[in-house]
Structures are given as C-alpha cells and as structure tokens.
Image (spheres, rainbow, N blue to C red):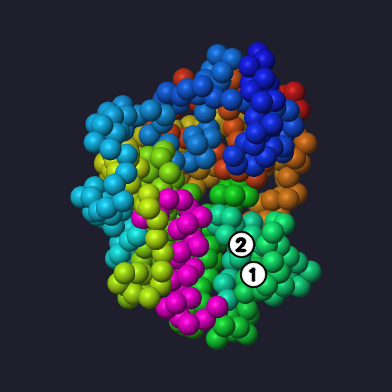
C-alpha cells in the first residue's frame, strides 16, 4: 500500500498545525504510524491522496448515514450555495429542519440550532442551570460531551465526588461543579442524588456510550436516571449527538423508551456539514434568549448550507425502508465479524446499537469505562493496520465507535468480513 503522498503532506501539516491535524484522533497516535490524507469520497468508499480505495466505517465519525456524497444532498447543496452561503438572518429552511427533527423526537418541543455538538452540550447545561438555579452537573466516566471545560474531567481518587482535569488549561475550579459517576451503576447514581440533589442542575449522559467504543446501557439504567431526576427536579440531558438517528430514527430515547428533558443533536442532522442543536421541554427552552434570560448565540447557526444538507438527509431517513435496509446490513456485518473472530480463535466482545458498533479485544463484558480499558490495545493496533492493508478503514482507536451507511453493499460486507478473518488469523 503506497502512502508516499500522505506522508509528505503530514510532514507539511506538522509545521503549520498542532500534531499536523485539526482534531486529535486523526493523528493516528493510538495506533502509530502516519495518518491518511483523503482526496475524495463516494458512497461507502474513501480515496486517499495516493489513490488507495477503502471501505469506510468511520463516515466522518457518524454523520454520513446515507454514505458519502449522497446524490440528493449534493444536488440540493449545489442549488443552495448559488443563493449564498450565510445570511446571519432567519430562513424558512431553519423552520423546515426544526419541524423534521421535532417529528422524530417528540420530547423536543422547542429547538435551537448551533454549529457543533460541543456547542449543543455547553448550551444545554447553561439552560439547565438557569432553569433549576443550581450549579452542579453529573456526568458519567467514559462519556464525551465535547471539549467543554467543565466536562473535560476524569474520575479521580474520590470517585463520585472528586475529579481531575482531562486537559491542560482547565482550572480545577471549573470542574469542581462536575460529579463523575460510573456508567451503568444505578446504586452510585441514586446515592449521589440523595446526598447532593439540592446542588445538582442536570445529569448529562450518552445513552449509548460512543466515545469508549460502543457501550450499551443496562436495562434499568436509563429508566433509573429518568425516575431519580424527576424525583429531585433535576434536568435530564441526553447527548444524542452520536446516537441521534443512529440507534433509531428517534434516537436512543425512542429505542429505550426514556424521555429526557433536553436532547443534544449533531452529526446526522447536518448531513455531513458542521451543525448541532439542543432542544426539549418548552418551559426550559423558553429561557433561551431572546425569549428568556439564558444567553446563547451563533452567527452561522442554522446556516442555509448545513440546514439544506440536514433536510435532505432526514427526508431519506424518514422512510421506513431506509432503516430496514440499514438493519439488514448491520446484522450481516455483526454476524460476519463475530464468526470471523470465532473461526480465527480470537477472543473479542462485539456490541452494537442500531448502526453503530465496536469490537473490543477483551474477554470481559464491557459495561463501563473501566471494563473497556481491559481491551488489548496492542492487538487492536495490529488489527487496525491489518484491515487498512486490506483496504478497510476503521477508526484509528480501540475506543471509538464504527458506523455503517445506506451505501454499504453486500459486497462491501463480504470484503470486510474476509479482511477481518485474515487479520484475526494474523493475530
């Protein structure tokens, strides 16, 4: 596999960008070697600058559920860009996208468009604090909610009550209002709320953890979050930036039948363009300026290009046949990867929620951040490079989810499973 041009570009990038990238995981630090530089993409494939073709299971980290350069999205964007890229003023397109999202997520009575998942979670927490007049936030270890200062925190020696910053530049005072708990631990959650409920504004959670691979909630976990937060008047926020339209058309909240107070979205609702949104109960969202006293603004929020791509994407997703096809493809990939590992004699744990998935190189059941860390990351590195050699592109980290799209074919799945079996055998 030739990667000469990618290596040259990476060397140039290192001189002008931190780590040569604009988002850390792209640098391949978790797997070693140099990152690929992509020249173009179409359907289920991406093509690097050296001309190599790969079956893509990263899909821009989730949003491209229809596949790359979906014809209807491209056609609509071409028309939209000729009318201008941004107005800084309202458009009818914003109403159309908001209406489509509301139909998919009944818990969202009012919605505000932003430009990223980070903006969505940051804003939702601010609104929750304004609504409850409390300050503390409960989050769960392993859940990533964007690079918000108060959420870049890891569990410290004190477990549920003390944390340490995950990043330089984050003052301890910023995270002093954040409580970290183990995902799927209902008893720890109940005890924490019982002790601190008067101080807690909100609980924020990825209902399916997509930033530690793909960790599923236990049957009672999300229901307990809902029951306990209602009991104490705490705002429950579902971060569905990754799970929205991925786990099901109405997100994880539809699949698990749990209704949050606020929902954060991104990824899919922009059809591959930068976008995010937060919304929920009318009485909470009515506090957002200019209607209320919680300030949040964005010049490019709801810009016509991102909104256009989102509208076209959701139109396709609203068809029942779309999810039937996606489910069939995902089942085929799941069976194939499990069988490939078994036949090769490699012990792995495979999990999936809708169209997102992860293969962990561990024999333990993965239920939280600590069990995810039992994965053999050296084995994953070898697996990553083995798959890449066979022209299958997966996330360059053991702790990132994979995704399928409407564009993935039976032939793609067959090639992927064959590549996986051969790579497993090499391990």
Q: Nearer the viewer, residue 358 or 13?
A: 13
Contact between labelled residues 2 and 1, with CB atoms less than 8 Å apart: yes
How many circles with numbers are drawn on the protein? 2
On screen, residue 174 above or below 321: below
Is 3 left or right of 317, judged from the image as shown? right
Q: Which residues are magenta?
A: 113-135
- Secondary element under disc 1, as helix, strand or loop, is helix
**What residue appears at the point 29 percent right and 65 percent down from the top-left corner?**
109
* Residue behind mark 1: 174
- State the quadrant of the N terminus: top right
In which image quadrant can residue 277 be found?
bottom left
Q: Residues within 10 Å of mark 1 (few under 14, many from 20)?
A: some
On screen, residue 64 above or below 120: above
Q: Nearer the viewer, residue 267 or 315?
A: 267
Q: Position of residue 267 (x, y in %)?
A: 44, 45
Let me know if residue 363 appears in the view: yes
Q: Earlier in the sequence, mark 1 or mark 2?
A: 2
- State the quadrant of the C terminus: top right
On screen, residue 261 above or below 135: above
Q: Residues within 10 Å of mark 2 (few under 14, many from 20)?
A: some
**What residue appears at the point 42 percent right and 23 percent down from the top-left corner?**
42
* Residue behind mark 2: 149
Q: Position of residue 67 (x, y in %)?
A: 41, 31
Q: Position of residue 208 (x, y in %)?
A: 52, 54
- Secondary element under disc 2, as helix, strand or loop, is helix
**What residue appears at the point 59 percent right and 25 percent down from the top-left corner?**
37
The dominant secondary structure in magenta is helix
**What residue appears at the point 55 percent right and 57 percent down from the top-left corner?**
145
Find the residue positioned furthest to the left: 92
């Amino acid at each position: 596999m030739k990667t000469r041009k990618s290596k040259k570009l990476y060397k140039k990038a290192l001189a002008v960008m931190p780590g040569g990238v604009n988002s850390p995981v792209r640098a391949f630090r978790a797997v070693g070697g140099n990152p690929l530089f992509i020249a173009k993409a179409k359907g289920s494939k991406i093509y690097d600058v050296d001309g190599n073709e790969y079956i893509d299971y990263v899909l821009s980290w989730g949003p491209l559920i229809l596949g790359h350069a979906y014809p209807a999205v491209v056609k609509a964007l071409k028309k939209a860009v000729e009318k201008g890229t941004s107005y800084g003023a309202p458009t009818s397109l914003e109403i159309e996208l908001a209406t489509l999202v509301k139909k998919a997520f009944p818990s969202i009575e009012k919605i505000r468009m932003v430009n990223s998942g980070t903006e969505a979670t940051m804003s939702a927490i601010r609104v929750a604090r304004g609504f409850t007049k409390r300050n503390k936030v409960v989050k769960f270890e392993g859940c990533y909610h964007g690079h918000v200062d108060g959420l870049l925190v890891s569990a410290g020696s004190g477990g549920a009550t003390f944390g340490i910053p995950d990043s330089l530049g984050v003052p301890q005072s910023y995270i002093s209002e954040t409580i970290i708990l183990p995902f799927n631990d209902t008893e720890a959650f109940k005890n924490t709320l019982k002790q601190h409920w008067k101080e807690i504004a909100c609980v924020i959670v990825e209902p399916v953890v997509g930033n530690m691979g793909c960790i599923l909630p236990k049957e009672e976990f999300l229901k307990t979050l809902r029951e306990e937060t209602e009991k104490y008047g705490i705002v429950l926020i579902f971060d569905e930036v990754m799970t929205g339209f991925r786990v099901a058309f109405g997100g994880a909240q539809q699949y698990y039948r749990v209704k949050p107070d606020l929902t954060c979205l991104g990824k899919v609702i922009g059809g591959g363009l930068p976008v995010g949104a937060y919304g929920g109960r009318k009485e909470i969202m009515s506090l957002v300026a200019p209607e209320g006293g919680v300030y949040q603004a964005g010049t490019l929020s709801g810009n016509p290009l991102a909104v256009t791509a989102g509208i076209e994407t959701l139109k396709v997703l609203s068809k029942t046949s779309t999810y039937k096809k996606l489910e069939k493809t995902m089942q085929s990939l799941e069976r194939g990867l499990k069988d490939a590992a078994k036949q090769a004699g490699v012990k792995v744990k495979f999990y999936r929620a809708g169209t997102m998935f992860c293969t962990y190189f561990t024999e333990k059941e993965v239920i939280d951040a600590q069990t995810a860390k039992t994965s053999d990351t050296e084995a994953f590195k070898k697996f990553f490079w083995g798959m890449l050699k066979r022209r299958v592109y997966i996330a360059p980290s053991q702790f990132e989810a994979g995704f399928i799209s409407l564009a993935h074919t039976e032939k793609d799945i067959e090639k992927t499973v064959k590549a996986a079996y051969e790579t497993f055998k090499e391990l």
